[in-house]
Image (tube, coloured by chain):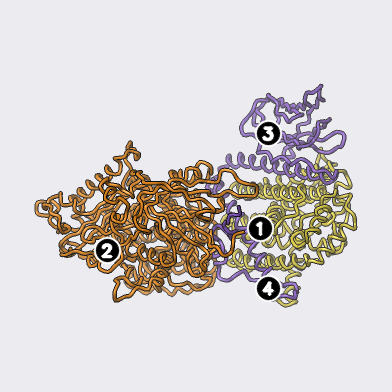
Chain colours: A purple, B orange, C yellow
Amino acid sequence: MNRPRRPTLPRTTPVRTWTSLFGAPKPPATDGTPLPDDDDPAALGTVIQRSVELAYRVVDDYLQQGQRAAERIAGRSYGPDAWVTDAQDVSARFARYASDAMGLWLDALDGVRDGRTPAPAPAPSGAATNGAVPPSPPTSGSWLVIEVQATQSAAVTLDLRAGVAAGTVVVHALRDVEVEKPPLRDVVVEPAVGDGPVRVCVRVPAGQPAGTYHGLIVDDETNRPVGSVSVRLLDA
Amino acid sequence: MTDDDRPLRVAVVGGGCAALSAAFELTQPEQQGRYEVTVYQVGWRLGGKGASGRGPAGRIEEHGLHVWMGFYENAFRLMRACYGALGRDRARVPLADWRDAFVPAPLIAVTERGPGDGWLPWMAALPPAEGLPGDPLPPGARPWSMLGYVRRMAGLLQAVFASLDSGREPAAASAPAPDAMLAQLTRWLRFGELATLAGLSQAAGVLDGMLGASPRLTDGLVSSFVDALAANARAQLEARAGDDPELRRLWTVVDLTLATMRGIVAFGLLTDARGLDAIDQYDCREWLLLNGASRTAVDSAYMRGLYDLGFSYEDGDPARPRIAAGQALRGLLRMMFTYRGAFFWKMQAGMGDVVFSPLYEVLRARGVRFRFFHRLEQVRLAERLLPGDTPHVAALEFDLQAQVARDRYEPLVDVRGLPCWPAGPDWAQLVDGELLRSEGRCFESHWDRRRVATTTLRVGHDFDFVVLGTGIGEIPRVAHELVARDARWRAMVDHVRTVATQAFQVWLAPDMAALGWPHPNVTLSGFVEPFDTWADMTHLVPLEAWPAPPGSIGYFCSVLPELAGVASTDPAYPLRQRERVHENALAFLRRDVRHLWPAAIGSDGEFRWDLLVVPPGTSVPPTAERFASQFWTANVNPSDRYTLTLPGSSAYRISPLDTTWDNFTVCGDWTDCGFNAGCVEAAVMSGRLAAHAISRLPALEDIVGFDHP
Amino acid sequence: MPDAATVAEAGDLVTEVLDEYGAMTRVALTEYLAPREPQRHLYAIVADYPRRGGRMLRPSLCLAAARAFGASAADAVRSAVALELLHNAFLVHDDVEDESDVRRGRPTLHALHGVDVAVNAGDALLLLGLRALLDNGRTLGPVLSMQVLEEAERMARESVEGQAMELGWRRDNAVHLAEADYLQMILKKTCWYTTIFPLRVGALIGSRGRAPLEPLLRFGFLLGAAFQITDDLLNLWGDEVRYGKELQGDLLEGKRTLMLIRLCEQATAAERARLRAVLATPRPARTADDVRWMRERMDAYDCLTHANTVAHALAGAARHEFAAVFGSLPDSRDKRFIAALVTWVLERR
């Protein structure tokens, strides 16, 4: 039976933004900016208006999100101690983003180079776990396990690229943002035994300064990074 | 594809403002007869929460007090179009034109604690504003923007400060250049020039200019400027106010205005794409406090009056005033700054007579069919969908409360030449009417489930589209399939809450002046519980049919608090609630009405029951017994309960434009309609949206205020 | 419309300020790029890109904004250095991602040293940039440096998200993108670190944290979007020497530019199918014929003209927003420089 249906509607929600958007004294002017020549001024006007409206919509939607973020941040005050802790937190997050970005690039790189579609990139993993975790149990990926031996509290984050097959890996020394801090060089990779995982053991020397140390995991055969590991050390 | 010649059949369930405005839009001439509309109505009369009836002596009996606000653009458009189509003969029918039916009432009043245990009315006559509500707007005009509102408020403050400064003229409102403004601002802030009233007035002018010149540039600056302005205004006014109640009231208004302005800027509402919805999680008072309003101001009579107007008490509990800040602010801004003609408009007869009989007559003339005594029992969804089919409503199941003896029920009665709705059904037009009457059938009661038959309407056979216009209180019962199947509907019925209301009306022999109330035609709120709102309705006397006309009429209403542990499923529930209202009314007349009508109290301190006017043929002694001859109601039927706008609830409302069900839409003041508050305007907007959902008419741009920030 | 002379003057002003602030940043950069043990070898590689020069647009924008809002250049120079370091880190990573062979007239870092060395160097640049921001604490005090750092963190997050969006499109071989998607992507991926972040950090420092940042986001976005679209256009119609990147490289990579999105929108169903097939081909298998065909179709549908118009429109809007942000500040060379940038992003070759 061909039932009549409700028509498709041009829109189903109120438009609450335009008036306030252009509520400023004059509409966004394009004067003062040279325009390319075009045969059809009317069509050109439409393109201009549309793109400007579009751009404002994009940035306004975005600002809303930003506003929420800002609300969270607002109202803090910093003493010298708070500054240090917060700066460490933010630096750690920053390093995480850097590593996430790297991961994405590598995934894409794989796909583009091999002409295959790589598995979806993992969602950027969250910031390093807050608070201390004991050196064991190990943090593990599907085929790779990280163990940290330290005299102080440490939190470990392992980020392995999805779709990377198990293999022999090399783990670079783990470095902190503060280049003066000695890197964690004592990293031993134990190859997989049978079906077991590859074990990566990071030994933290006594007296290692607190910080977030970050290292690449590289496939030994292809020499291509397959993931990263972060170790956050708290003060002893 | 449908046959082009066949009109599309629309079943409209419910006969309140929302449902009838949908029916009205679907049968407008521009629709060219594409829609064949049938309205299904429980009981004998249209009107929903707005239904009224004529009782003994032709007196008007309402659900409560209905005032129309001067910004009800959609509702007034509907009424103006309706009266236009009606073409009543002025010589034969009173209220021939909409201007006869609605009369400006510029006086607003709230009450505040006076000395001792007294109450003082606080009244203001708001100046007439240009135009009339429902006048067409210039094409493309958007008379409101958040910036515009803030500037209006700045202007208001300027005028207030200037008027206090021994009548000095407000400084010219011309905007200085931004650079100069900034310099000036810095000077204000630095040298404390705000500390004089003249300074305040000029500063408000600068604020206005600053906003006009570059709203985005100065968000932070505006906030700190408003703060400085507020601090100084507080010091100034508090120092001067002393015991002067007028100055204190003014300070309250200034305080609330400043907090609102600051909040609009600080919360980024000037540009937020969600408009005022962005702050709907807050309660209005809470938001004002956040933005620096003083406790005194948010607890003022002014704020109480505002909450009373919207019955904004969770579970009817006077201790829990709650209304979503965004919608409250939207209402307040529109109320204060966008009214046309007058602030209030009062109907010159019952709402049924002024609104619903004209709508009924016009719709009848347009070929709309009305099926009275139809109580919706279930909205049935399509169980299994064929490939390519989309979710839809398959059937509507009704109980038939009574069979109509002739081919149609004639619902109206004539009172002094005006077509009106009676307070009860015309039993003579019903099959076995006398029997039904003797059985005491209450067609409008949720608790009286008796029926004489059932009937089922099927998609394709009886209807193509459904507009569900019942109150939200009925939704869990009549649409439980929808609620069970669709999580959004479930969330909606959980979050969009209602409250029972109570009202009583008294007819008195003396006029208002003789009762001790010297002011004309007032609508007053913010008074005591159990009845916080009062309206002088004396103007209705000539329209009723009294052999010896009363000197005055008073309507009182309020929320009816929920009682803990009382089950509304008890069949005796409605009667018990009615008894409660009766008791409340007696207590109110004995204890509280003296603050309004001092002369209605006898020398023994008791209300003078002999002042109550009794309908002819009734004889009651002049004791409290006599109140039984007056009118009161407990609006406890699910569909009669008033829709609240609790903080955070709007997000759960479903829009009439929702496209989930391809042949079904909803309307009512409980839907997400752009003005999410319980009122005629919201109902009419939702009805117009429902019509748009089916026919794409009217255009959304013509639904005034739908796109309001 | 400004006359040609005004445009030329604006161009001179931009060149002059870029030179001056670029030099200032480079001097400060050496402090961070100075070789030090035990990573002498790595530092040489790390310092490669920053030493190749470049326009120093980001640090200059940051310095100019800071000064326009009232700070001294010394207060902002570390942040400017950080920006340049971060920018170079992104370039290294970008080049790896895009498999570009040439950067600023020389082989790319990964072409010279291999991918993992390049990625490591990119990382080191990021961390050095962060280091420079941490050093702000000494001069700007904890509150302000924290604000700057938080801006940086946000910028990094936004950039990653933008990157993820774009890579997602490539991975899914998306051909049904709308212009709004594109704008959203470049807002995050390009504008945040090219314009928004430098402006906001500059304004924060200049106003000691008091300037409202939201308007800068609007202005920065519109300016940055005009910049990015023009940049992509230059890739298509510029010549290799002046642009310093492979000509038509974007087409070869299948980069989702506004022109490509426009082409997808305008193309017939058959053309779209071919486009999809071409874009699905691994890059080495893409032929010069494919690239020529895409370019020819773009011309047939006026995609370049369209994108150019959009860039101009956004620049116009940016000019409007400029008045909202900077209008109330006293006149200065820095303010004029930022104003002139709006025109410059369109006119540069």
Q: Which residue is mark 2?
A: B522
Position in image of residue A185 (x %, y %): 78, 31
* Disc 1 packing (10 Å; few <14; some 14–19; many ≥20): many
Which part of the image, by quadrant, shows the N terminus of chain C? Answer: bottom right
Position in image of residue C124 (x %, y %): 77, 43
Q: Nearer the viewer, mark 2 or mark 3?
A: 2
Q: Is residue C45 above or below residue A213?
A: below
Tag of residue A232: 3
Position of residue B455 in the picture relative to residue C141 (left or right)? left
Q: Is residue A60 above or below residue A98?
A: below
Q: Secondary structure at mark 2?
A: loop
Tag of residue C199: 1
Between the C-alphas of marks 2 and 3, the distance is 71 Å
Tell me the residue at 44%/47% (across/down).
B475
The answer to whether marks 2 and 3 mark residues whose Cβ atoms lie closer than 8 Å is: no
Q: Which residue is mark 4?
A: A32
* Marked residue chain, label 4: A
